[in-house]
Image (cartoon, rainbow, N blue to C red):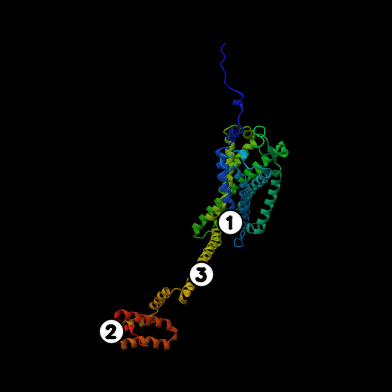
């Protein structure tokens, strides 16, 4: 029986540490979907939402916005600001380059604990934003559809109370979420890699409370019904009634040639805001209903993980809604737009004016330095520059210009005259010096020019009488 000879030795079966580490590193590379959707796009949207909601909140809490609806909108901007801010730490991990494997990310114990806390707060803030939209939709419905009862119920004090109650309920909703997950050390690579290559890596997993079936069912039920289904249906019904009432008001105003109410723009702005919420929160509502029907679809899912990718896109849409609420305020809110431009455009104008003042001060300092240097040159450091400057001063002054004309007439007419006439002409500016001592510099220079002109015209004018 033929047996082929094998040339494999023990040394061929031994793998070097560097090659083993590189192969494991390539096998643990992250997908491009998580990098771009959960990382780059989410991080950009969260930064945009943090800045925009902070600016909108600073406008809506001013005394120039005396309306109960603006109180609800300020609470909405605050909840969206908290949601975007708390999502940034998780987006930073996913925004690392794709070449960096998962076990090389900074997954320390403190950072993982921080991710659990911020995740619970962001989930609560997104739930609060939905209920705040319900609150100002009801407020507008009472003001438009029940105009006789509206002024007594839709006040600023009642709006502040309702907003405060919603935030208190949100705190009770967030407390169980803080204990849903716990930090766990991942030791999957400690047996494969050598000790000097491994480092402590932590992840979060479901705690005893989170893995409890009663808690899971209660949380999924509350999240599906109380956060998405009931609020979104309420918003849709009330928005339809508001649209019908607005159309009726427009018809009556067209029939009687009467102007529309002054607060009509606020209602249109709220309608646009709630419509945007319905569009971008419907994927999250679909995911929550799917979790309520069968959670095993997400747990036992196999590659390419389409349901999990859909869940990531739904979270991205909810974050985009929280970040772009100010766009509806600027487009449809005339009062908000005027206040925004008045405050922040004036700040930009002040910054530009301060820059102009600084440039002018700098130019003035440079001119003072040049003048001081020229004064030093007048004291004898540079005689050429002083002569040029004095001649320039003579040409610019009107009195010296007239004198210079007269001197030219004298010099042209007296070319054939004797030295006595030149002496008389040269003595005239000296008399002028005695009568007017203020213009001493210009008269002296005038006499110097006469001497030089006489020098060029005839050789007889070298003799100057004393």
Q: How far apart are marks 3 and 2 (CA)?
A: 48 Å
Residue 365, disc: 3
* Camera-side residue of 85 and 383: 383
Q: Distance between the residues labelled 1 and 3?
A: 39 Å
Rendered image quadrant of residue 109: top right
- In screen coordinates, is 100 left or right of 175? left
Q: Is mark 3 on a helix, strand or loop?
A: helix
- The residue pinned by badge 2 equals 413
In the picture shown, does residue 73 fall above or below 6? Answer: below
What is the x, y in percent for residue 265?
54, 56
In the picture shown, does residue 70 fall above or below 307? Answer: below
Query: Which of labels 2 and 1 is toward the front?
Result: 2
Q: What element carries label 1?
A: helix
- Residue lying at the far right in this picture: please name it: 208
Answer whether labels 2 and 1 touch (C-beta < 8 Å).
no
Rendered image quadrant of residue 436: bottom left
Q: Distance between the residues labelled 2 and 1?
A: 81 Å
Look at the image and tell me whether residue 47 can be seen. yes
- The residue pinned by badge 1 equals 55
What is the x, y in percent for residue 463?
33, 85
In the picture shown, does residue 300 fall above or below 417? Answer: above
């Amino acid at each position: 029986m033929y047996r082929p000879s094998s040339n494999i030795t023990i040394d061929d079966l031994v793998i070097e540490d560097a090659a083993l580490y590189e192969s494991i590193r390539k096998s643990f590379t992250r997908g491009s979907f998580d990098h771009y959707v959960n990382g780059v796009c989410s991080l950009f949207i969260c930064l945009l939402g943090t800045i925009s909601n902070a600016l909108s909140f600073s406008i809506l809490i001013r005394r120039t916005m005396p309306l109960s609806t603006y109180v609800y909108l300020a609470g909405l901007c605050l909840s969206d600001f908290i949601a975007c801010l708390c999502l940034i730490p998780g987006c930073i991990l996913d925004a690392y380059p794709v070449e960096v494997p998962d076990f090389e990310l900074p997954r320390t114990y403190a950072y993982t604990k921080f991710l659990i806390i911020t995740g619970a707060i962001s989930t609560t803030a997104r739930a609060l934003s939905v209920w705040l939209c319900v609150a100002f939709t009801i407020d507008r419905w009472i003001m438009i559809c029940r105009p006789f009862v509206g002024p007594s119920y839709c006040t600023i004090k009642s709006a502040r109370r309702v907003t405060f109650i919603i935030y208190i309920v949100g705190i009770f909703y967030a407390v169980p979420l803080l204990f849903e997950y716990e930090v766990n050390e991942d030791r999957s690579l400690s047996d494969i890699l050598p000790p000097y290559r491994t480092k402590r890596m932590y992840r979060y997993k479901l705690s005893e409370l989170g893995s409890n079936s009663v808690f899971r069912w209660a949380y999924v039920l509350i999240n599906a019904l109380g956060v998405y289904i009931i609020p979104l249906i309420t918003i849709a019904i009330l928005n339809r009634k508001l649209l019908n009432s607005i159309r009726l008001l427009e018809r009556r105003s067209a029939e009687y040639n009467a102007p529309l109410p002054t607060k009509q723009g606020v209602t249109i702005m709220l309608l646009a805001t709630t419509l945007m919420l319905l569009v971008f929160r419907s994927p999250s509502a679909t995911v929550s209903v799917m979790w309520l029907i069968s959670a095993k679809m997400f747990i036992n899912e196999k590659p390419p993980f389409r349901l999990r990718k859909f869940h990531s896109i739904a979270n991205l849409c909810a974050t985009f809604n929280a970040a772009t609420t100010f766009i509806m305020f600027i487009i449809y809110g005339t009062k908000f737009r005027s206040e925004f431009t008045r405050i922040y455009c004036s700040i930009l104008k002040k910054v530009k004016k301060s820059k102009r003042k600084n440039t002018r001060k700098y130019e003035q300092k440079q001119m003072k330095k040049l003048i001081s240097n020229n004064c030093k040159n007048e004291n004898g450091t540079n005689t050429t520059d002083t002569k040029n400057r004095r001649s320039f001063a003579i040409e610019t002054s009107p009195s010296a210009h007239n004198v210079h004309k007269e001197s030219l007439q004298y010099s042209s007419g007296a070319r054939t005259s004797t030295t006595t006439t030149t002496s008389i002409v040269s003595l005239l500016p000296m008399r002028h010096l005695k009568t007017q001592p203020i213009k001493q510099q210009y008269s002296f220079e005038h006499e110097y020019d006469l001497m030089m002109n006489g020098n060029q015209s005839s050789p007889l004018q070298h003799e100057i009488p004393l």
